[in-house]
């Protein structure tokens, strides 16, 4: 079995491995924060400082 992770970017599904790591991290963080807010949590994205 092979698992392929895809992310929708600009209306098209793109293999996660084809995107820069920073872009994937930003999209995933925004999606998790949006899901948290939809169920009543307050969310904030932390910026890396190092």
Image (cartoon, rainbow, N blue to C red):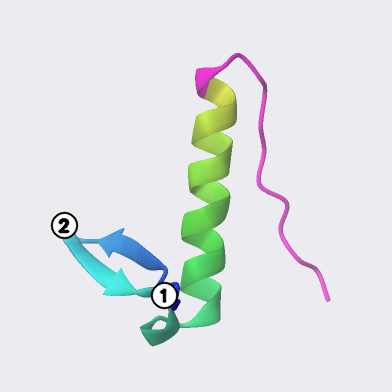
Q: Would residue 12 be found to the left or right of residue 44 on screen?
A: left
- Mark 2 vs mark 1: which is more N-terminal? 2
At 50% from the left and 20% from the top, the residue drawn is: 38
Task: Indicate the quadrant where residue 7 lies.
Answer: bottom left
Q: Residue furthest right?
A: 50
Q: Give the percent coordinates (x, y) of residue 47.
A: 71, 59
Q: Which residue is mark 1?
A: 16
Q: Would residue 26 be found to the left or right of residue 19 on screen?
A: right
Verify whether residue 37 appears in magenta: no
Q: Residue furthest front?
A: 1
Q: Would residue 20 be found to the left or right of residue 44 on screen?
A: left
Q: Nearer the viewer, mark 2 or mark 1?
A: 1
Magenta part of the chain: 38-50
At 57% from the left and 52% from the top, the residue drawn is: 29
How crowded pointer 1 is (Cα within 10 Å; few <14, some 14-19, many 20+) is rated as some
At 51% from the left and 47% from the top, the residue drawn is: 30
SS label for mark 2: loop
Q: Which residue is mark 2?
A: 11
Residue 16, compared with residue 31, is above or below; it is below
Q: Would residue 22 be found to the left or right of residue 20 on screen?
A: right
How crowded pointer 2 is (Cα within 10 Å; few <14, some 14-19, many 20+) is rated as few
């Amino acid at each position: 079995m092979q698992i392929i992770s895809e992310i929708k970017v600009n209306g098209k599904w793109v293999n996660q491995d084809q995107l820069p790591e920073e872009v994937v991290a930003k999209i995933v963080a925004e999606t998790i924060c949006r899901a948290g807010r939809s169920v009543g949590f307050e969310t904030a994205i932390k910026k890396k400082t190092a």
